Amino acid sequence: MGIDDLKKYSSYTKTLESNDIKKARNMIERNVHSEIMKYMLDHNEKLEQEIISIKR
């Protein structure tokens, strides 16, 4: 899942929870999927893959 998926399915996103924010920041620090994590933090949203599989 990438930024394009987050944009495409934005109507299905959920607000980030505190543990999501901690994990995203940690991943950014370790330079793991940094762009996606920054996008999620900037937009305060996440997308569960199960929703994508249902929509497609």
Image (tube, rainbow, N blue to C red):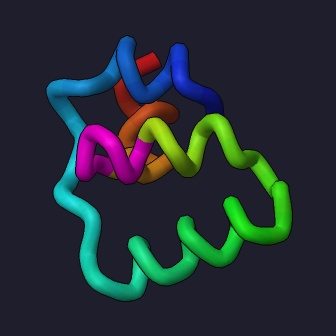
- The residue at the point 37 percent across, 41 percent down is 51
User: In the image, 9: left or right of 14?
Assistant: right
49 vs 4, nearest the viewer: 4
Task: Decide: is 30 above or below 52.
Answer: below
25 vs 47, nearest the viewer: 25
User: In the image, 27: left or right of 12?
Assistant: right
x then y, percent, for residue 28: 68, 60
Pick the quarter of the image with the N terminus: top right
Q: Assess whether residue 44 is covered by the magenta stretch.
A: yes
- The residue at the point 70 percent across, 47 percent down is 34
The residues colored magenta run 40-45
User: In the image, 26: left or right of 25?
Assistant: right
User: In the image, 43: left or right of 39?
Assistant: left
Magenta span: predominant SS is helix
- The residue at the point 40 percent across, 73 percent down is 21
x then y, percent, for residue 30: 83, 68
x then y, percent, for residue 48: 42, 52
Q: Assess whether residue 4 is covered by the magenta stretch.
A: no
Task: Decide: is 52 above or below 9.
Answer: below
x then y, percent, for residue 40: 41, 45
- The residue at the point 65 percent across, 36 percent down is 35
Figure quadrant of residue 18 = bottom left
